Amino acid sequence: MRVDIEGLAVDIAGTRLLEDVTLRAGSGRVVGLVGPNGSGKSTLLRCVYRALRPAAGRVLLDGDDLHALTAREGARRLAALPQESASEFDFTAAEVVAMGRLPHQSAAGRASAADAAACAAALAQVRAAHLAERGFLTLSGGEKQRVLIARALAQQPRVLVLDEPTNHLDIAQQLEVLALVRGAGPTVLAALHDLNLAAGHCDVLCVVAGGRVVASGPPHDVLTDELLAEVFGVRAHRVPHPATGAPHLLFDRLPPTGGTPDAQP
């Protein structure tokens, strides 16, 4: 499913947080949003999963205005994993994952054999089947994140929106989850802090700074020395990953204006 964001603007408490944001995610593509803290990545994603209504512009799913869809129809097409997902009640992990099936159930809300199979498959995909009967509140941060990703996959969406999906995961889990998301099939919009993870797992990167998209394209084309210095305030050294060829970045601080690089010990 194609996602088109057209001229999006967001105002909160009289402050414009996003201005004229336009981007496209082709069907089945993985699009990463990268940028400094406070640049507008999460605000943009909140518009895509309808937690915020934009002041201007629109979000289209295969040409249909997302905000014109019913909540049920929207949830059948799109699933989201926000950066913060609170749970006040100690549901089991299996019960949390089962919530992803609600858009597909009748008004009576009875789970079917197909619902149970989808939930079991999602837990297995993220290697969390052994957590099914554990209370969600007893899980570690990484275990919770896996269960929440399983809930999104159980929803069987055609678009998956992820805000920092690798939070609380160790490096092996980060690589595994991003590979899983990439192989799951939906169109993916993901905000990522780690530029190397983004470069290695995304088809397209959109760089967000000051509430605008300032660059977009394949990672190799976008992550230039000039852009990294201007947007992130770092000096970068690009080397190809020996296995994948994806750009891999090594960072150090920019020298003070008119100065020389920091001396190395």
Image (spheres, grey):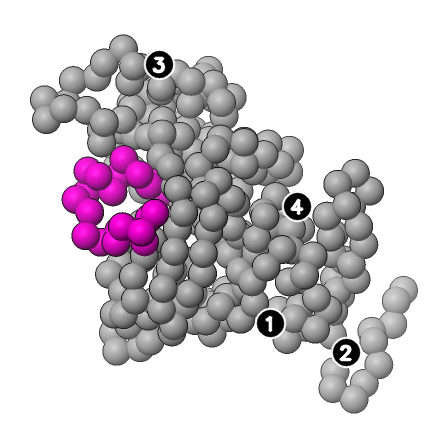
Along the line of sight, the residue nearer the viewer: 181 or 57: 57
How many labels were placed on the picture?
A: 4
Q: Which residue is mark 1?
A: 231
Q: Decide: few, some or many residues near mark 2? Use Cα within 10 Å; few <14, some 14-19, many ≥20.
A: few
| C-alpha separation, residue under disc 2 versus residue under disc 3 | 56 Å
Q: Is residue 185 visible?
A: yes
Using the rendered view, name the quadrant where residue 251 is placed: bottom right
Disc 2: which residue:
255
Left or right position of 57 against 226: left
Dots 1, 3 in contact, CB < 8 A = no
Q: Amino acid under label 1?
A: Val
Q: CA distance from mark 4 to mark 3?
A: 32 Å
Callout 4 crowding tier (Cα within 10 Å): few <14, some 14–19, many ≥20? some
The residue closer to the viewer here, 25 or 93, is 25
Distance from the alpha carbon under mark 4 to that under mark 1 = 20 Å
- Cα distance in 3D space between marks 1 and 2: 15 Å
Q: Which residues are magenta?
A: 60-81
Say which label, 4 or 3, has the lower sequence index: 3
Are the residues at dot 1 and dot 2 in contact (C-beta closer than 8 Å)? no
What residue type is disc 2 on?
Answer: Pro
Residue 227 spot, x, y in % from top left: 65, 71
Pick whichever of labels 4 and 2 is earlier in the sequence.
4
Which residue is tagged 3?
A: 117
